[in-house]
Amino acid sequence: MITALFRLCLAIAALVGLAAPAAAEWHKAESENFVIYSDSSAADIREFAQRLERYHVAMTKLTGFTPPPPSPSNRVTVYAVGSDRTLKKLYGDTGSSVAGFYIPRAGSSVAFVPNVRLRGSETDFTMIVLLHEYAHHFTISANPYPLPRWMTEGMAEFFAAAKFAPDGAMDIGLPANHRVGDLNFADKLSIRELLD
């Protein structure tokens, strides 16, 4: 665990601090619950932070759980790291199918996703991944006891299937169309395999 964490810290340092001169400039956006680092435009990551805050509020309304505002040093830090390839290197397994990951900690939890593309009210897959990862953070914070994995993954998928309307409204719990490709009916999955 310590070795993996050390490798992750080194990779982040290399990504943020040792970038080649030709690399894009990194930007930071801060909000009440999030700190975001990305090489996307400053305007895009500000919009990204606003959407994450809207999502947080929607989850509080839906669940009835209103966590206290985190201290500035205890907000979720999001690294939008560029490509899927870079993300998989940070994860430590370039052959993995991971699309993003979250590391819960007592303080300063972190999430890693590829750069998020904002497409109007349509939710890009990388944003869905981040919403899924934040849903884990939110549900862990909301429950004093550990929940079974099937429940935490199910809740994260439910909350992540969201859409942002231009007028500030949000839809949550939409059909998880991003998972349709995972249901390969040609292989005729058994119900046991499907629910596993």
Image (cartoon, helix red, strand yellow):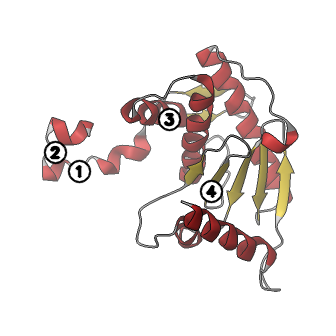
Q: Amino acid at mark 4?
A: Phe
Circle 4 sits on which residue?
A: 112
Q: Earlier in the sequence, mark 1 or mark 3?
A: 3
Q: Disc 2 to disc 3, how far (Cα)?
A: 23 Å
Please say if 14 is above or below 50: below
Identity of the residue furthest to the bottom in this view = 21
Q: Is residue 64 left or right of residue 36?
A: left
Circle 4 Cα neighbour tier, 10 Å, few/some/many (<14 / 14–19 / ≥20): many
Circle 2 Cα neighbour tier, 10 Å, few/some/many (<14 / 14–19 / ≥20): few
Circle 3 sits on which residue?
A: 156
Q: Earlier in the sequence, mark 4 or mark 1?
A: 4
Looking at the image, which residue is at 46% across and 59% down? Answer: 98
Please say if 45 is above or below 60: below
Q: Disc 1 to disc 3, how far (Cα)?
A: 21 Å
Mark 1 vs mark 3: in front: 3
Return the residue nearer the eye: 117 or 88.
88
Circle 1 sits on which residue?
A: 184
Hey, which quadrant is residue 15 in on the image?
bottom right
Q: Earlier in the sequence, mark 2 or mark 3?
A: 3
Q: Quadrant of the C terminus?
A: top left
Q: Disc 2 to disc 1, how far (Cα)?
A: 8 Å
Looking at the image, which residue is at 65% across and 44% down? Answer: 105
Q: Which mark is residue 189?
A: 2
Q: Are marks 2 and 1 in contact (CB under 8 Å)?
A: yes
Q: Earlier in the sequence, mark 3 or mark 4?
A: 4
Q: Which percent across, then down, holds residue 90? A: 58, 68
Q: How many marks?
A: 4
